[in-house]
Image (cartoon, helix red, strand yellow):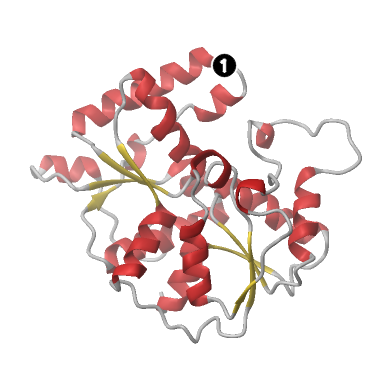
């Protein structure tokens, strides 16, 4: 992840070998590690963490799936196997605080791992970034997106499941020339179509794909940028923009990328 951009990303194992313990585990997630588009988000957020001189580390090759897709697809045994394996790993490193760029990982760590004994302080990166900007430790160039029309798509596992609606809007309202809401937003936002394991299965019968309807709602705002805060949402919205042949005029950026661009990273 760090080689292409020459970002120094500390490994948990290396720090443990030196007897050091970071304050945060930066949980990258499957998409952040393997999806070419979302790797850019991982790099952007890691660069921001470094800029803030945050005490953090990643697991690297020790990071495995949280088990969330398995549980959503109905394979409870696989979920518990994967979760217990990670809980044991976290315990070995003494991990207490987790920052994640994936709402699905955030939700499962925060709300489902405690049932198996995994008790952590789980922080969504949008909350972390909002707090940093509120404290003034991140000072982006407000002219970068001056005049831009931006709409924001709420990920289900941030807004509806965990009531995280305002941090991304605080960020965008500060940076955006104009933030335009879709008709369905916040707790009433419409799904991108990838949640609940739908990302990994064939579409069911119906008149229209969910991601197309959500993309159409976004495009109704006549945006220059559709902002997202979830790897699944980014994949679906990007596909929707391409399906509508609007990729030349409408861009899909993650919240972390927008801040990184405004910081000149």
Residue 262 location in percent, x, y?
45, 77
Residue 81 location in percent, x, y?
42, 17
Q: Residue at x 47, y 68 (%)?
A: 171
Outermost residue, left side: 19
- Look at the picture and state if 155 lies above or below 256: above
Residue identified by numbered label 1: 75
Does 42 sit left or right of 38 as displayed?
left
Q: Residue at x 55, y 22 (%)?
A: 71
Outermost residue, right side: 207
- Within 10 Å of disc 1 (Cα), the crowding (few <14, some 14-19, many 20+) is few
Q: Secondary structure at mark 1?
A: loop
- Look at the picture and state if 259 lies above or below 60: below
Q: Is residue 3 visible?
A: no
Does 70 sit left or right of 84 as displayed?
right
Q: Nearer the viewer, residue 168 or 5?
A: 168
Q: Quadrant of the N terminus?
A: bottom left
Residue 219 location in percent, x, y?
77, 65
Q: Residue at x 55, y 50 (%)?
A: 230
Residue 145 location in percent, x, y?
55, 81
């Amino acid at each position: 992840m760090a080689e292409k951009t020459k970002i120094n990303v500390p490994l948990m194992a290396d720090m443990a070998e030196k007897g050091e313990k970071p304050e945060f585990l930066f949980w990258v997630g499957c998409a952040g590690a393997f999806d070419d588009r979302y790797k850019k988000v991982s790099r952007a957020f890691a660069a921001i963490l470094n800029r803030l001189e945050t005490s953090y580390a990643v697991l690297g090759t020790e990071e495995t799936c949280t088990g969330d897709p398995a549980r959503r697809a109905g394979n409870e045994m696989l979920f518990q196997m994967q979760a217990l394996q990670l809980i044991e790993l976290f315990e070995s490193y003494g991990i207490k605080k987790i920052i994640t760029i994936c709402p699905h990982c955030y939700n499962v760590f925060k709300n489902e791992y405690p049932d198996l004994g995994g008790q952590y302080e789980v922080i969504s990166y949008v909350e972390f970034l909002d707090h940093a900007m509120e404290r003034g430790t991140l000072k982006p160039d407000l002219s970068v997106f001056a005049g831009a029309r931006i709409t924001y798509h709420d990920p289900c596992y941030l807004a509806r499941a965990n009531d995280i609606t305002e941090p991304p809007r605080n960020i965008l309202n500060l940076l955006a020339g104009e933030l335009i809401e879709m008709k369905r937003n916040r707790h009433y936002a419409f799904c991108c179509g990838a949640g609940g394991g739908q990302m990994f299965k064939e579409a069911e019968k119906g008149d229209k794909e969910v991601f197309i309807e959500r993309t159409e709602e976004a495009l109704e705002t006549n945006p220059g940028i559709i902002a997202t805060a979830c790897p699944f949402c980014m994949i679906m919205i990007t596909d929707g923009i391409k399906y509508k042949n609007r990729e030349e005029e409408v861009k899909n950026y993650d919240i972390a990328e927008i801040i990184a661009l405004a910081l000149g990273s």
